[in-house]
Image (cartoon, grey):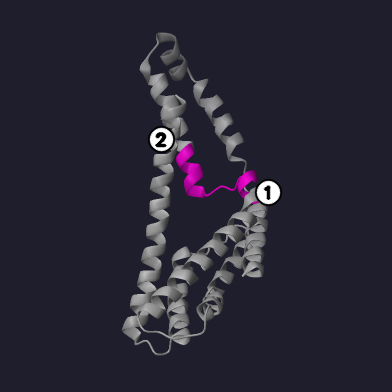
Amino acid sequence: MTILYVTVGMATALGMLLQYLTLPPLDQIQTNLQGLLTSTQVYQGWVQSGSAAAVVFDVLYRAFWFTANLRLDYPTRAGILLAPLSIWVGGLLRWVTFAIFGEYFGRKLGGQAPRRAFWGSLAVANAPQLFYLLTIVPGMIVPSSLVTGWMLLTTYQAMRVTFPALSWRRSLAAQFLMFAVNYLFIVLAFVLGILLGVAVYQRAF
């Protein structure tokens, strides 16, 4: 699993780097265009008269470029450097948590298999992640829905192979519970993190 996610992470980072080098510098375009627009007589008239239109223009202009950066998925230096680490850590955490919950519910619903047998099957089920190697090509986008959908099928197959005694309905139920409980814990961790942050802030101030 480490080899898989490190390989995908390095390919993703290299693709982001090539995209960063070949795309026009958006921050420079934003600055130059802002200089041209703010030097017009209309904008200068707004500033001299103290009109709120100048403030509204500045806010809308920044909001436009903020949205453009999000929509274009423009790579940043920090994103390029952190891509391998984030993909590796995130992938391993998902694999471990899914393996724990999947094996638990598979056994609870009547499945029988050697201990941690599902871990190996689930590792093979992560093979569709290799599609992200295509992102090494600048501008190439691999739909996450395609990879996710394929992994749902491979995960179901991993459940069936590991616990052959389970019917297809019980296999689907175990897979659904595996995903549901995993994401429930993520939501709870997020909420508890916010509450903890608020409590610490209130104590400090």
In which image quadrant can residue 165 be found?
bottom left
- Residue lying at 48% horizontally and 65% vertically, measured from the top left: 97
Q: Which residue is mark 1?
A: 21
User: Which numbered disc, 1 or 2, marks the residue that appears first in the sequence?
Assistant: 1
The magenta region covers 66-80
Residue 6 placement (x, y as % from top left): 66, 63
**Residue 120 visible in rendering:** yes
Q: Is residue 115 above or below residue 137?
A: below
Q: As shown in the figure, which amino acid type bears the numbered disc 1? A: Leu
Give the left or right position of residue 149, taking residue 133 as reference: left
**Element at badge 1?**
helix
Residue 13 placement (x, y as % from top left): 65, 56
**Residue 137 visible in rendering:** no
Q: Is residue 132 above or below residue 50?
A: below
Which residue reaches farthest bottom? 165
2 in the magenta segment: no
**Element at badge 2?**
helix
Give the left or right position of residue 152, taking residue 139 as reference: left
- The residues bearing labels 1 and 2 have C-alpha atoms spaced at a distance of 41 Å
Q: Is residue 145 above or below residue 52?
A: below
Which of 175/64 is in front?
175
Q: Residues within 10 Å of mark 2 (few under 14, many from 20)?
A: few
Label annotation for residue 198: 2
Residue 85 placement (x, y as % from top left): 63, 55
Residue 160 placement (x, y as % from top left): 43, 85
Of the 4 image quadrants, the one containing the C terminus is: top left
- Residue lying at 54% horizontally and 31% vertically, measured from the top left: 33
Q: As shown in the figure, which amino acid type bears the numbered disc 2? A: Val
Q: Is residue 143 above or below residue 161?
A: above
In which image quadrant can residue 193 be found?
top left
Magenta stretch prevailing secondary structure = helix
